[in-house]
Amino acid sequence: MNRWYNKPCERVMEELEVDFSGLTEKEVTTRRDKYGFNELIEGEKASAFLIFLEQFKDLLVIILLGAATISIILGDIESSVVIFLVVILNAILGTVQHIKAAESLNSLKKLSSPTAKVLRGGVKIEIPSREVIVGDIVYLDAGDYICADGRVIENYSLQVNESSLTGESESVNKQVDVIDEEDIPLGDRKNMVYSGSLVTYGRAKILVTEIGMKTEIGKVAMLLDDTSKKKTPLQVSLDDFGKKLAIGILIICALVFALNIYRGYTLISAFMFAVALAVAAIPEALSSIVTIVLAIGTQKMAKEHSIIKQLQAVEGLGSVSVICSDKTGTLTQNKMTVKRLFVDDKVVLTNDIALDNNLQKNIIMQSILCNDSIISDDKEIGDPTEVALVNLGRVFSINELELRKMYPRLGEIPFDSDRKLMSTVHNIDDKNTMITKGAVDVIIRRVTHIQTNNGIRKVTKEDIKSIENKNEEFSKLGLRVLGFAYKEIEEKEEYNLEDEKEYTFVGLISMMDPPREESKKAVEECIKAGIRPIMITGDHKITAMAIAKEIGILHEGEESVEGREIENLTDEQLIKKVQDISVYSRVSPEHKIRIVKAWQSRGNIVAMTGDGVNDAPALKASNIGVAMGITGTEVAKDAAAMVLTDDNFATIVKAVENGRNIYNNIRSAIKFLLSGNTAGILSVLWASILALPMPFTAVHLLFINLVTDSLPAIALGVEPYKENVMKEKPRGINTPILTKDFTIELIFEGIIIAIVTMLAFKIGNDNYGEGMGRTMAFATLCLSRLLHGFSSRGNENVFRVGMFKNKYSWLAFGVGSLLLFSILLVPALNGVFEVTYLGFNNIINIILLSLCSFIVIQIGKTLKSIIISTKR
Ligand code: ATP
């Protein structure tokens, strides 16, 4: 085994045949054959057969199988074959849907797959982590997941959490120096980093030594957790409902069985009656429909820039009542341009900047040196705030790379959003100098001197006042303001937070980050939908207020507070006050968690955005953690339930709308299935109580299950999304899917369909005998359910919902009817499906009865809408 840690960097580079400008693309291609891709080979995936077997674990299916087995023992082979067929076909359907859903989640995951910043041919580029190869030089920043094992070759206070490998939760400091020991444990290899660990602080460059399965994590073959396996709350509650339903059905079947035995039926026919009831009553398609609707929904959302990482987020989105959003980049464009400077007590507009003024030149040079961003081939790489400063330099023909070569960085204390400062050390005019930029209110507390055109002097109270006033004035214009200061500092190995004090103040640079055009509309839509938008930003209070007012988040009577003001409040006080606050500024990540929790204690479902490494706990604490796809760190993306590929607030609102629609479609499909089953149960119960012959044979029930249940239910799942969902209030998260209204409605619809079915049975039975009765009951139940597919498309009557809006409903109805009438009208099929030839009159009767059920249900829906609107 190669011990990279006890070799100096140069040796490692020599052995891996690479220099400080990184690999060339040509070398990468040749290495690819040798090393392959940087990916872990996934462990055994559940085979299709195993997934198929899983489908038989359901209690309802077990009841059916039990019934089939007893049927065989009793000699009724035909019924048991039919039941087996129902169960097997359903299991196949379930397996296909399960695999499809897993595939779609996997493809979504790929969309949000991690990237790495590498140096290739002297140029820093971003590539998918999968393409990283041995010998690559990779840049690491706080918040990155490390994608390969590597030797640290440049280090700026890098701290790494290696708990996935070592179990140690404390971050470890890394170094470049050689470790002159042999066989030291992984946790002590301070100059190495390992794939799967997380950068918690600082920056570094590493040289990749091992990729894919050769990495330490690859050897352990530990895979990152797979969230797709988790069931959503809806699926859990449906499972629970299924169990209760199974018990209910068993009890009813037992009663019917007992009643029929009492009546003197033979054991076989009493039993078959009970089995028919069970088959009719069990909604086999229920859970597969939910899975498929969720899978289709998430695909649609991915196209609209929101990638769902946890399926439960889809349902949760529909209940979101508060969206806490970052400002920079989410509500604003994150395209910053410098607008004005403030130096020597004077405001200088960008157009008036003159480099022959020493002070102005100084602040611009400092802003480029204390800066990690670059513009390469017209591509801006780095934090937009810093890119704006690099752009300003370019206007004056200052190339950031050349300037940084002239004054190399000798040390640094990286930016973090808690401290709101960044410092770098350079040798300028033979003096070791620390340059610091950051939030004005933080810088100002640390200055002792001020630089003016007339030289450096002690800072006065008036100076401070004047800087604060300017900061406020700029902020009121919605500008983002950075302060700049520097100091001479003795040379040392490492610089720390203690050094960030006793500065000489240079000036302010303010930049514009205009709101996104769509933010205002999205905020308005949010408010209409009963969702409270909240701005949480690290930026200055006044800048935040200016932008919040402009886009409609901050209104008269609502408050804007700073992070430190929250610190003075107890949790109880915050819970009381939280409703009055629309804007939080100068917030650090811990404040975010308190804000989320306060809203949650008031019974709200909170979506929270985040991008930084420290945002992960708040993302996890919120109900729907939303990570930024472009600017977000890998850690934030990992902790989130949803990733925005365009970092846009409007996308969250769109996702909420989609979430509501998907939930509604699932609800319609469930209602359709359950009302159909209710009709089936009632018909069989009715026959049993009135001692009539059995209204359906086993083959009929098979047909109903596979055709009239599944087809319209799938069509309901893909019902086009309705626009008016955003005019309603959010659904309470604890509202069960089977609300009282919902249950009453589905039972009512079930009763109507059962009535027409039994009327058809009676007409056939009374006039032509049992066989005709059964055929008519079967045909009427089928046709009524196919028509019911239309009725279930919304809360209002189908004409208001729009008869022609869902072409899949028509397709389901067309295919279903075609199959039904083929059975009824093609003599060769009559025998197979145990139906009697109907004749013209009876066909008309069937159609009329089915239409009757359809019309009565429409009347019911219309009356309900009238009652609701008069109540309002
Ligand atoms: P949001 O939280 O809405 O994304 P933000 O980008 O302003 O807003 P942070 O990134 O936490 O939030 O930044 C907080 C403050 O730190 C900024 O207002 C700015 O004053 C300062 N700041 C931001 N970026 C840098 C940087 N690269 N170097 C120095 N200071 C910075």
Image (cartoon, rainbow, N blue to C red):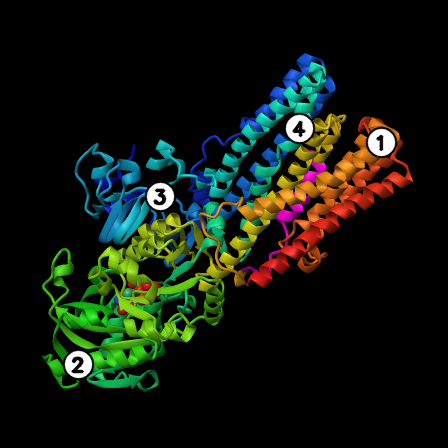
> Residue visible at 86% across and 43% down?
844
Q: Which mark is residue 148?
A: 3
Closest to the observer, 854 or 825 = 854
Q: Which mark is residue 465?
A: 2
Q: Which of marks 4 and 1 is in front?
A: 1
Q: Which SS class for mark 3?
A: loop
Q: How far apart are marks 2 and 1 (CA)?
A: 99 Å
Outermost residue, right side: 840
Q: Which mark is residue 766?
A: 1
Q: How far apart are marks 1 and 3 (CA)?
A: 79 Å
533 relative to 20, above or below: below
Q: Which SS class for mark 4?
A: helix
Q: Determine if residue 143 is in view.
A: no
- Image coordinates for residue 217, horizontal then vertical, percent: 34, 36
Q: Quadrant of ligand 1?
A: bottom left
Closest to the observer, 476 or 34 = 476
Q: Which SS class for mark 2?
A: helix
Marks 2 & 1, CB-CB < 8 Å contact: no
Task: Pick whichever of labels 4 and 3 is earlier in the sequence.
Answer: 3
Q: Does the magenta stretch include residue 719?
A: yes
Label 1 environment density (alpha carbons within 10 Å; few <14, some 14–19, many ≥20): few
Q: Distance between the residues labelled 2 and 4?
A: 84 Å
Q: Give the range drawn in magenta.
A: 705-725
- Image coordinates for residue 716, horizontal then vertical, percent: 64, 48
